[in-house]
Image: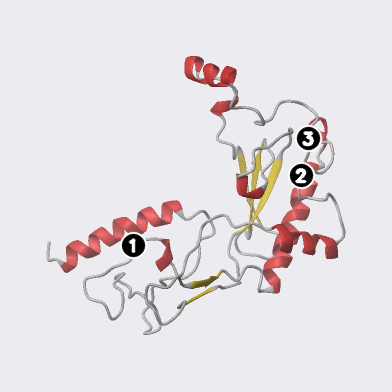
C-alpha cells in the first residue's frame, strides 16, 4: 500500500542514515525489514497455521530487486505448505545438460484458495484504523480490494517464491526416494545430501533452522557410520 508519510525504508540507505547507524546505532537502518510476522489459520478447523503474514515498512516489488521509488508498506502473504509439486527431469542424453525444472506453482487449486484467503486477511489488517494515517491506496502489482476472480488472476500473474525449495532429493525408506533415512544417495557410494532438498515436505516455518538441525543430525550419522 502507498504510504503518504516519509516514514518507511524507501531511501533509508542515504549517507545521513548510514552515519546515524554507524555512529549511534539508530535510524531506519536498524530495521530488519520484516518487522512483524504472524502465522494464521485461514479456516478455524485447521490443526495448524496455513499462512504466514510478513509486514515490512517498504514496497516489495520484483523479488525486492527493484529499488522502491515511493513510500509504501507491504504485507506479504506466504503459503506455508503448498500442495502443488514440481518436477526435475533430465535436459537431454548428455549428463552435463541443464535439467528441466518446473516448480509447479499453483497447480493445485487449494493453494490458490488458501492464498486468496490470506490476502483477504491482509486486507483486513491494512484497513485497520491504526494504519489509516499510513495507507493511501494500492501500490505496485496489488490492485486494491477486488473480486475473487480478479484476485485469482493477480495472484497467478504476480505470486513470487520465498526461495525455500525442498524435496528435490527427497529422503525416504522407499526405493523411489533419492536419499535413504541416513541421507545416503541410493545407488551411489560415499555420497550424502545434507540440505533442505532431502525434506519430503516443507516445514510450516522457514527452512533455515530445520536445515541446521539436519546438518547436526548428519554429522552424528557420519560419525556412527565411521565407527567414531
Residue 165 in the image, given as x and y percentages of width and height: 50, 62
Residue where numbered disc 3 is placed: 131
Residue 44 visible somewhere in the drawing: no
> Marks 3 and 1: in contact by CB < 8 Å?
no
Marks 3/2: CA–CA distance: 8 Å
Where 106 sits versus 162, above or below? below
State which tag comes first along the sequence, 3 or 2: 2
Q: Which mark is residue 125?
A: 2
Q: Which residue is labeled 1 in the image?
A: 194
Question: Is 82 located above or below residue 161 in the figure?
Answer: below
Look at discs 1 and 3 and give the one toward the viewer.
1
Q: Around disc 2, counting alpha carbons within 10 Å, would you say few (fewer than 14), some (14 to 19), or many (20 or more)? A: few
Residue contact at pointers 3 and 2, CB within 8 angstroms:
yes
Q: Is residue 10 above or below residue 190?
A: above
Disc with the residue nearer the chain's start (1 vs 3): 3
- Residue at position x 78%, y 32% in the image: 134
**Mark found first going from the N terminus, 2 or 1:** 2
For numbered disc 1, what is the local secondary structure? loop
Residue sitting at x 51%, y 53% = 206
Instruction: Tell me: 119 left or right of 56.
Output: right
| Residue 113 occupies quadrant | bottom right
Residue 116 horizontal side relative to residue 218, left or right: right
As drawn, which residue projects farthest toward the left?
227
Q: CA distance from mark 2 to mark 1?
A: 39 Å
Q: Say which mark, if any, is on residue 56.
A: none
Q: Residues within 10 Å of mark 1 (few under 14, many from 20)?
A: many
Compare residues 49 and 126 and report the one nearer the observer.
126
Residue at disc 3, secondary structure: helix
Answer whether residue 18 is visible to the viewer in this image: yes
Q: How was this image coloured?
A: secondary structure
Residue 55 at what x, y percent from top left? 66, 42
Amino acid at each position: 500500500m502507498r504510504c503518504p508519510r516519509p516514514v518507511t525504508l524507501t531511501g533509508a540507505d542515504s549517507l545521513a542514515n548510514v552515519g546515524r547507524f554507524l555512529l549511534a546505532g539508530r535510524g531506519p537502518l536498524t530495521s530488519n525489514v520484516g518487522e512483524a510476522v504472524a502465522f494464521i489459520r485461514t479456516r478455524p478447523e485447521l490443526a495448524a497455521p496455513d499462512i504466514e503474514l510478513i509486514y515490512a515498512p517498504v514496497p516489495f516489488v520484483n523479488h525486492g530487486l527493484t529499488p522502491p521509488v515511493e513510500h509504501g508498506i507491504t504485507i506479504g502473504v506466504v503459503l506455508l505448505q503448498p500442495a502443488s509439486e514440481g518436477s526435475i527431469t533430465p535436459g537431454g542424453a548428455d549428463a552435463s545438460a541443464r535439467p528441466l525444472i518446473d516448480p509447479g506453482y499453483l497447480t493445485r487449486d487449494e493453494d490458490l484458495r488458501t492464498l486468496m484467503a490470506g490476502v483477504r486477511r491482509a486486507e483486513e489488517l491494512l484497513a485497520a484504523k491504526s494504519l489509516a494515517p499510513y495507507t493511501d491506496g494500492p501500490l505496485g502489482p496489488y490492485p486494491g480490494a477486488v473480486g475473487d476472480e480478479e484476485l485469482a488472476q493477480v495472484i497467478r500473474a504476480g505470486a513470487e517464491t520465498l526461495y525455500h525449495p525442498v524435496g528435490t532429493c527427497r529422503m525416504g525408506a522407499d526405493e523411489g526416494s533419492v536419499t535413504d533415512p541416513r541421507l545416503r544417495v541410493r545407488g551411489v557410494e560415499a555420497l550424502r545430501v545434507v540440505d533442505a532438498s532431502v525434506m519430503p515436505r516443507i516445514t510450516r516455518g522457514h527452512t533455515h533452522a530445520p536445515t541446521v538441525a539436519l546438518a547436526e543430525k548428519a554429522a552424528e550419522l557420519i560419525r556412527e557410520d565411521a565407527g567414531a
